[in-house]
Image (spheres, helix red, strand yellow):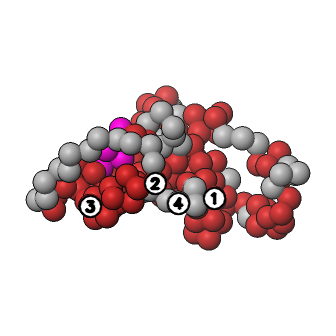
Amino acid sequence: MPRKLFKRWSPDPNTLKTSRRLRFLGKLLHDPNLFHMTRFSVSSACFFGLFIGFFPLPVGHIPAIAILALWLRFNLPIALACVMVSNPLTFPFIYYSAYVTGSWMLQMPIADITFQANWAWFKSFLAEAWLPFVVGSFSFGIGFGGLSYLAVQWLWRWQVISRWQARRKNKPHTF
């Protein structure tokens, strides 16, 4: 089930390799490990995708996870899907929750935040709240990434064992 499900939702590797937009990557996309559907490749992609997705990066999540996938050679499409946990609809909730969690972890008071859309407000917020925000984001990334890694490992192993048992049950015994 996991392999079929992931393959069904993943883009075709040949389409990505021949894409005009990705031509600048050259031979990097021809690494077969970027598209393999193994238990460790998919679980690593889920871990790093969620870790990067929960962490605020000024450069962007997609280029960061793509570079990390090219470097560490885990499944690129799954990692890109997991990094989408942080999108314009979810990141305000994620980042505020990370800030509150970081404040709780560091035992710091939560700042009275009244949002203003100007640069001075942003600078003053970062001066006060950057440490709890980073600690909360890091803990969310490690926590949810680790849970996804363990969940994929467990589900994959459970699926393989259940298939073995079903095969053993249907196989005639010869002595």
Which of disc 4 and disc 1 is earlier in sequence?
A: 4
- x and y, in percent, of residue 42 in the image: 53, 51
Q: Are marks 1 and 3 in contact (CB under 8 Å)?
A: no
Amino acid under disc 3: Glu
Residue 96 lies in the magenta stretch = yes
- The residue lying at 61 percent from left, 53 percent from top is 62
Question: Which residue occupies the foreground of this view, 118 or 47?
Answer: 118
Question: Which residue occupies the foreground of this view, 24 or 60?
Answer: 60
4 or 3: mark nearer the eye: 3
Which of disc 3 and disc 1 is earlier in sequence?
A: 1
- The residue lying at 86 percent from left, 59 percent from top is 23
Which of disc 3 and disc 4 is earlier in sequence?
A: 4
Judging from the image, what secondary structure is the residue with disc 4 in? loop
Which of disc 2 and disc 1 is earlier in sequence?
A: 1
Residue linked to disc 1: 63
Q: Which residues are magenta?
A: 93-98
Which of disc 2 and disc 3 is earlier in sequence?
A: 2
Residue 100 lies in the magenta stretch = no
Instruction: Count every numbered label the image shows and give the total.
Output: 4
